[in-house]
């Protein structure tokens, strides 16, 4: 049994080491692949920009393909020489995401691979903007959490063990009012996150998905808001009726 236990543990350790080595190898290969691509910055969707490669000793530079977020375009077009050692190509991206430009030449390193990130604004989010957005989001989330914590503690009609109201609260309308505020905060948070995703994140589907959720929430307000107002009015009227009923000596009011 001891030998079997030792063999099992040794095998387990070997497998764990192999898994770790495999992971490190894949990570190293990914690093090599990414480092082999030059970052060409951030550009704006549906707006033409000029993509250039510097190669002093080349007689031609050919753009062979452009890999878009949804497909790969075979280009095979000679890039225009500008006279200053640059070969340029005009391109207009039609969707948000990452574009990989690949080509060949008879100079420099013979091949090149460059990528550009396409966003809605054509700008990368700055540290200042990130700090501001995060500050607003954290404030709204903390406020919503506080309201969720506060909600069970708000005044409500006091009931006995049989479920009958024995003491009416004139502030019972605060509960649906706070629920409305929580809903408004949820809408605000979703809207901010959706706009940040659409404007700055190259994974366009993420921004579209979150913005779709916000759109559904907004359209649902056509039903939710009238019901919310009616519910608040109902709670105010009901509190008055319960108070009047109890003052008359009633004992069986749900």
Image (tube, rainbow, N blue to C red):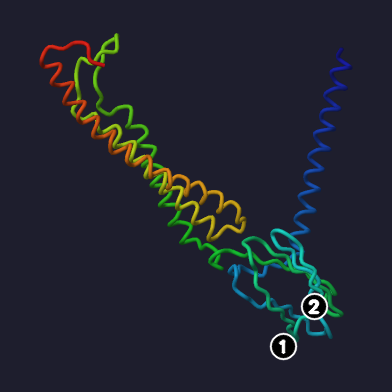
Give the residue number, with chain letter if any, for mark 2. 77
The vertical placement of 243 against 33, above or below, is above
| Residue bearing the label numbered 1 | 82
**Residue 166 percent location from the top left of the image:** 20, 14
User: Any mark on residue 172, and which?
Assistant: none
| Crowding near the residue tagged with mark 1, few <14, some 14–19, many ≥20 C-alpha atoms within 10 Å | few
Q: Would you say 41 lies left or right of 149 here?
A: right
- In the figure, 241 relative to 52: above or below? above
Q: Which of the 4 image quarters holds residue 142?
A: top left
The residue nearer to you, when weighing 30 against 75, is 75
Position above or below: 206 against 245: below
**Towards the viewer: 89 or 8:** 89
Q: Residues within 10 Å of mark 2 (few under 14, many from 20)?
A: few
Q: Residue lying furthest bottom in this view? A: 83
Q: Nearer the viewer, residue 103 or 216?
A: 216
Give x and y (percent) for residue 162. Answer: 29, 9
Residue 135, percent from left and from top: 42, 52
**Between 253 and 132, which is closer to the camera in this rendering?**
253
Q: Judging from the image, what secondary structure is the residue with disc 2 in?
A: strand
Looking at the image, which residue is at 43% across and 49% down? 137
Q: Are marks 2 and 1 in contact (CB under 8 Å)?
A: no
Q: Quadrant of residue 144?
A: top left
């Amino acid at each position: 049994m001891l030998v079997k236990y030792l063999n099992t543990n040794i095998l387990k350790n070997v497998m764990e080491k192999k898994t770790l080595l495999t992971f490190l190898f894949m990570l190293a290969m990914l690093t090599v692949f990414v480092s082999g691509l030059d970052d060409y910055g951030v550009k704006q969707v549906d707006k033409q920009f000029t993509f250039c490669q510097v190669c002093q000793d080349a007689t031609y530079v050919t753009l062979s393909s452009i890999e878009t977020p949804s497909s790969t375009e075979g280009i095979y077009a000679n890039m225009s020489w500008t006279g200053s050692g640059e070969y340029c190509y005009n391109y207009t991206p039609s969707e948000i995401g990452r574009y990989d430009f690949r080509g060949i030449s008879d100079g420099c390193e013979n091949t090149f691979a460059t990528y550009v990130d396409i966003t809605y604004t054509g700008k990368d989010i700055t540290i200042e903007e990130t700090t501001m957005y995060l500050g607003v989001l954290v404030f709204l989330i903390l406020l919503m959490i506080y309201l969720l914590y506060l909600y069970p503690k708000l005044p409500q009609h006091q009931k006995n063990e049989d479920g009958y109201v024995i003491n009416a609260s004139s502030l019972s309308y605060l509960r649906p009012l706070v629920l409305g505020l929580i809903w408004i905060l949820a809408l605000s948070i979703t809207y901010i996150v959706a706009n940040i995703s659409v404007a700055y994140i190259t994974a366009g589907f993420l921004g579209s998905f979150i913005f779709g959720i916000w759109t559904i929430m907004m359209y649902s307000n056509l039903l939710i808001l009238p019901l919310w107002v009616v519910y608040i009015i109902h709670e105010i009227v009901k509190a008055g009726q319960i108070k009047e009923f109890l003052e008359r000596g009633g004992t069986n009011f749900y």
